[in-house]
């Protein structure tokens, strides 16, 4: 089964990237840190994603590697969304 990412994922992510230009899509390979994601906004992002996607993100997934890019974050969250890949 392939995960269909909801627009809400991108909306929540965009809310925590202050350096991303308004209306621009979040590039899958862009550094989230370069787009303004810091440690405090990462905490708020996790809470926002859990609420929006109705999932619980396990502590084991809370790594710098998983939050490096939008693509790495999607890959990390895919199993929680029903995508085993």
Image (cartoon, grey):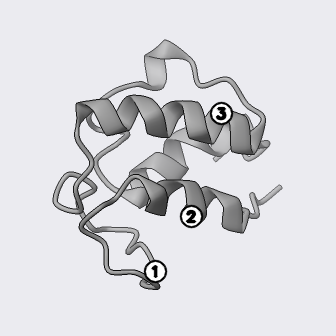
The residue indicated by pointer 1 is: 25
Nearest to the observer: residue 85 or residue 59: 59
The residue indicated by pointer 3 is: 50
Return the x and y of residue 17 as percentages of the image width and height.
34, 59
Q: Secondary structure at mark 3?
A: helix
Nearest to the observer: residue 3 or residue 16: 16
Return the x and y of residue 19 as percentages of the image width and height.
24, 67
**Label disc, if present, on residue 10 of the rendered structure:** 2
Res. 29 image quadrant: bottom left
Q: Secondary structure at mark 1?
A: loop
Give the left or right position of residue 44, taking residue 17 as reference: right
Q: Residue at the spot x=35%, y=42% of the render?
A: 67
Label 2 with label 1: CB-CB less than 8 Å: yes
- The answer to whether residue 84 is seen in the rendering is no
**Distance between mark 2 and mark 3 Cα atoms:** 13 Å
Ranked by sequence position, the earlier of labels 2 and 1 is 2
**Label disc, if present, on residue 4 of the rendered structure:** none
Q: Residue at the spot x=77%, y=60% of the render?
A: 2
Spot the residue most to the left: 34
Q: Is residue 80 above or below residue 60?
A: below
Return the x and y of residue 23 as percentages of the image width and height.
46, 85
Label 3 with label 1: CB-CB less than 8 Å: no
Res. 70 image quadrant: bottom left
**Distance between mark 3 and mark 1 Cα atoms:** 21 Å
Q: Is residue 63 above or below residue 8?
A: above
Spot the residue most to the bottom: 23
Ranked by sequence position, the earlier of labels 3 and 1 is 1
Spot the residue most to the right: 1
């Amino acid at each position: 089964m392939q995960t269909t990412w909801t627009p809400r994922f991108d909306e929540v992510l965009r809310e925590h990237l202050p350096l991303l230009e308004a209306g621009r899509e979040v590039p899958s390979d862009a550094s989230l840190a370069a787009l303004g994601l810091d440690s405090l906004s990462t905490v708020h992002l996790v809470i926002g994603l859990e609420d929006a996607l109705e999932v619980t993100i396990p502590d084991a997934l809370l790594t710098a590697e998983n939050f490096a890019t939008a693509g790495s974050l999607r890959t990390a969250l895919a199993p929680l969304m029903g995508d085993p890949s």
